Amino acid sequence: MNAQSCLGQEIDARIAAWLSAVACVPADGFAPVARFEDVPDQARADSYYWCDSIFRSEVNPHNEALGARHAVHAATDDTPDLLRHELSAGGLDLTITEGRNFVLVQVERSCLDILSLGGPDRAAAVRRVAEALFNTGVTSNTAGVPSPSGAVVCPIPGEVPEVEEGTTFSSNPAVDPYLLACWKDRTECGVQGGKLYFLCYKKSSQRAGFENAWQWFEEG
């Protein structure tokens, strides 16, 4: 097995673990917060920073005009500390779940039933939603990764595999997430439970690897 295959397997396992951790939290496992200021200090600061970096203002869960509902899940033996934002914006019903190291955006089937579309239309929908969600005007410092202003952070239609239940694909599979200098240099996408999702890495250029996701709420 070559190095690229090993890297791909390692990344796939990490993504699967993050998705599983989110899915494992029961419906009542998130406690609503009336004011986001009540979220633990480090998690609150991280959320503001990454949401401002990743999302267009029109869909940013911290845009007060959108009236997002916020909730927290304190770590258990099986699940890390998590934040959740639920909102409707730009014609999309979104559930955004943050861990310390990732942002997971799930597009609810109430606004986009991706699997009900014809094959070519599914790929077009992926791009359309990505363009509505992401702040693509940021630039990158990751060596060897072209990052023109305004680039779309997902594969364009025609470059993605069949978009089916369980499909996963990456905007830049050759890039190691451990070494990202900018979140937009690699974005994951897929379909789980009939929902289109995107997963972005919270990765600082000053740090290799990822933080302890079970201690996010403890640090302030």
Image: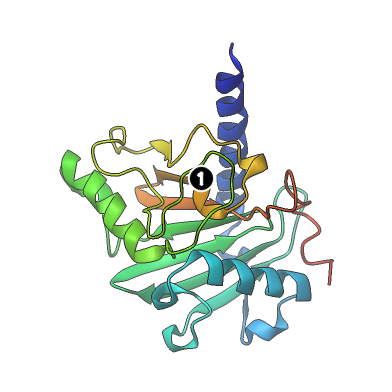
Q: Position of residue 51 (x, y in %)?
A: 55, 69
* Res. 215 image quadrant: bottom right
Q: Residue at x 47, y 74 (%)?
A: 60
Q: Secondary structure at mark 1?
A: loop
Q: Where is the C terminus found, in terms of image quarters?
A: bottom right
- As drawn, is 72 to the left or to the right of 64? right
- As drawn, is 176 to the left or to the right of 95? right
Q: Position of residue 178 (x, y in %)?
A: 67, 41
Foreground residue, 182 or 188?
Answer: 182
Residue 105 visible, this orientation: yes
- Residue that lies at the very extreme toward the right in this rendered image: 219
* Res. 6 image quadrant: top right
Q: Residue at x 38, y 47 (%)?
A: 154
Q: Is residue 151 above or below residue 132?
A: above
Q: Where is the N terminus found, in terms of image quarters?
A: top right
Foreground residue, 204 or 215?
Answer: 204
- As drawn, is 120 to the left or to the right of 94? left
Q: Position of residue 71 (x, y in %)?
A: 60, 73
Amino acid on which the number 1 mark rests in the picture: Arg
- According to the image, label 1 marks what residue? 186
Q: Residue at x 69, y 58 (%)?
A: 100
